[in-house]
Image: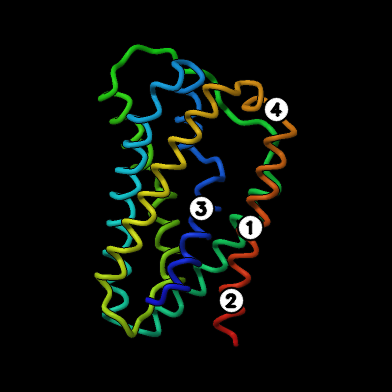
Amino acid sequence: MTFETWLAFVAASAVLLVIPGPTILLVVSYALGRGWKVAAPVATGVALGDLTAMTLSMLGVGALLASSATLFTLLKWIGAAYLIWLGVKLWRAGTKLDTKARTDAGGAARMLGHAWLVTTLNPKSIVFFVAFLPQFLDPSRPFWPQMAVFEATFVTLAFANAFGYAILASRARRLASSERAIRAVNRAGGAALIAAGTAAVTMRAA
């Protein structure tokens, strides 16, 4: 892959990770209830969960790429449409998030395992990776080296994002319950997803 493609992947991944989803809500709930010390274990669990879901997803994409270039191209078109649909859905989302503080007992290992399970077993994660990653793959280049780079990059960003959310949530509890802030995040994230999907379609139509 080219350096420009990698940078585009980094930028798109960063935007997508910042958008609050089930995993981030779990991170925030732990941080609200137990403070900044949860940041490392829950962020590690999120990163491992994304690694698991991403690997499972890309094994399927790799098999599809090897079997049919036409089907792979079709998957990329479907992926672009999926990104746009996610963006519209997020733009129209409500202003409230379920960020109730978690004060239940449990050590670092339990929190790590919980974050890993929530991230891995969320069916939307695998669907998302199948739709998102093919936008950046070059069918003319070896699949596995590209996969290794994308996985390492995304997992690193996922850890940093979850860690950052935990720290911010532990220090800014009012922001987590601010409808204005939530609305702004939802609309900004929705617009970014719509733009990403539209750009993917435009680049392939050119």
Q: Report the front residue among 53 and 176.
A: 176
Q: Report the front residue among 8 and 112.
A: 8
Please tell me whether mark 3 or mark 2 is closer to you in this view: 3
Q: Please state which amino acid type lies under the numbered disc 3.
A: Ala
Q: Please state which amino acid type lies under the numbered disc 1.
A: Ala
Per the image, the residue denoted by label 4 is 178
Horizontal and vertical percent position of residue 70: 40, 85
Residue 142, placed above or below residue 161: below
Q: Secondary structure at mark 2?
A: helix
Per the image, the residue denoted by label 3 is 14
Per the image, the residue denoted by label 2 is 201
Residue 64, placed above or below residue 177: below
* Mark closest to the chain's N terminus, 4 or 1: 4
Per the image, the residue denoted by label 1 is 192
Q: Disc 3 to disc 2, how far (Cα)? A: 20 Å
In screen coordinates, is 42 left or right of 201?
left
Please tell me whether mark 1 or mark 3 is closer to you in this view: 3
How many residues crowd around disc 4 within 10 Å: few (fewer than 14), some, or many (20 or more)? few
Q: Secondary structure at mark 3?
A: helix
